[in-house]
Amino acid sequence: MKKIIAMLLIAALLLSVSACGAKEEPAVSVDLNALYESYGAYMPDMFQPDADTMMNFLGIDTADCAQAVVYVCADGMRTDEVWLIEAKDQAALEKLQKLAETRIQAKADETVSYAPDQYAVVEKAQLLTNGLYLALLVSPEVDSLKAGFEAAFQ
Amino acid sequence: MKRFLSCLLALVLTFSLCSCAAPTTPAETPDPAQTETAPTEADGVPLQSETPAETAAPREGSLFLNVSSINLSLVGDSEDIYLGMIPREDVTFESDDTSVVTFENGILTATGVGTTTVRAVYLDRQVECTAGCLAETQEELDALDPEILSAPKRLPPVVDLETECTYFDNSAIVGDSITYFMFQWESKNNYLGDILFLARGGVSLNGFVKRFKNIYYRGSEIWLEKAIEQSGVDRVYIMLGQNDLSSKARTIVMDNWVILLDRIRELNPDIQIYLQSCIPEYASDHSLDQKNDRIETYNETLREFARENDCHFIDLAYYIRDQYDRMPQIYSQGNYHMNEAGCLIWMQILRFYAQYELEGGDLS
């Protein structure tokens, strides 16, 4: 009896794990430029770093990306920043996740002492993934941006 | 007899040829370029009985003034605005209205309230700027509209930022949040070409020297000198000190400069280092005036330090001042950062001095 229960439990676990895995695989291919354009209403004056600046300033190597849509706020008093990236593979995704975490930490360091309102924005920053897609969202409208990212995969 | 006659004929022919050739020798042929473009009395340039151009070959190089516009505060104030490249003694300095300012030997002196145009002229080259004076006395100055008093005292020479710039392609600019703000505005238009920004909010000389706040480069936090080394740039523009002056004595700040430059040069022995003066801060109620005095004193020390330590010096603060030596209000974002207008002026200053250096100017 114990053996049957144990086997049933393992079967249930395997099913749930495979279901989780299925959920992480995006069913659709997302056009990240179109997604960013849908954020237009929430974005202040932003600039799009070129490949060199992405590498030097953020550490993002475009060779790791199938798509990379990165925008940084042009106004120094605001900390808004959006990364929408499709990684080339799992290893690239993990690398990009680490870069995004470093970036959030850097932005927190930069704002904590002299821009408490912006620090509050950084504290609510979202780092999201879906399959090989990654989003770093730093914005006072982060909830709306997050909803947009999630909706893109439905 | 025939032989005598033919000798005589040959002699006459030789003489006649010589006298024909004489008027066409280059020495006596006027240089069309000079005669067409040199200033004349009708152009408002007083003719001298013996100009240097008549006694020596024309000098190479452009004429530079360090401003496109300047408003001296009070009658009697004076300022040297001539940057070269032609020696002053060879240049004619003119003022359109000497009852407002005189312009002699490159030095402006305010003589009355108003605005006029001054210029430096050498042969066919000339450069001009707007020069004025705001008040006869301090009381009159203080009574002026606050908008006038908080406007920029000086504007840099005009540079068309839209024209492509490659001068900074192998350069880095290092600084704290003030530079970081400029990075954000510059990146919109790339007015400094492919310059590399090594900027981070809150960094200081002390932080770099003690290693507790470094630079993010290519996704990692690394020491400043390492980032410079890895980037492979051959010029670095640095503005630091603003975050040190509030809590550190000037002598400590300068000691930290020595350490930082030694470290940079140890890893980057051939690098050209440009120190930029710190900019004043803005407060409408003058509550930052004392800090601004400290910044000014620090900048003078930094200028001397640059000279003694084989660095170039760009006096950014010279242009970022109103009539009370604060940051002009129109450049201000918060108390100590510059907005887009201020950052555009900064880029213009860097572009102007790049041009100045390209034409042989010396910033050391």
Image (cartoon, coloured by chain):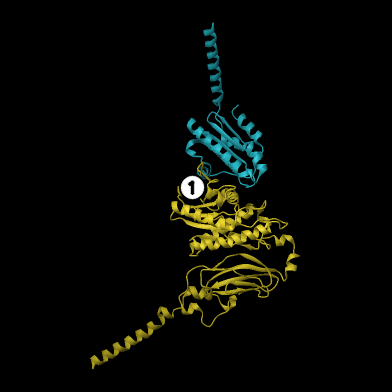
Chain colours: A cyan, B yellow
Q: Residue at x 40, y 80 (%)?
A: B25
User: Dot 1: what SS?
Assistant: helix
Residue B348 to residue A47: above or below:
below
Horizontal side, residue A107 vs residue B142: left or right = left
Number of callouts: 1
Q: Residue furthest bottom?
A: B1
Q: Chain of mark 1?
A: B
Rendered location of residue B175, percent (x, y): 56, 51
Q: Residue at x 60, y 30 (%)?
A: A152
Residue B226 to residue A36: above or below:
below
Quadrant of the snapshot with the N terminus of chain B = bottom left
Would you identify the image quadrant in which residue B140 lies?
bottom right
Q: Residues within 10 Å of mark 1 (few under 14, many from 20)?
A: many
Rendered location of residue B73, percent (x, y): 68, 67
Residue A84 appears in the picture as rendered? yes
Q: Residue at x 41, y 78 (%)?
A: B26
Residue A17 to residue A30: above or below:
above
The kind of residue tagged 1 is Ala
Residue B323 to residue A84: above or below:
below
Rendered location of residue B66, percent (x, y): 58, 65
Say which residue label 1 marks: B227
Residue B160 appears in the picture as rendered? no
Judging depth in this view, the residue of B274 and B53 nearest the camera is B274
Horizontal side, residue B273 vs residue B24: left or right = right
Judging depth in this view, the residue of B284 and B93 nearest the camera is B284
Horizontal side, residue B6 vs residue B301: left or right = left
Rendered location of residue B190, percent (x, y): 55, 50
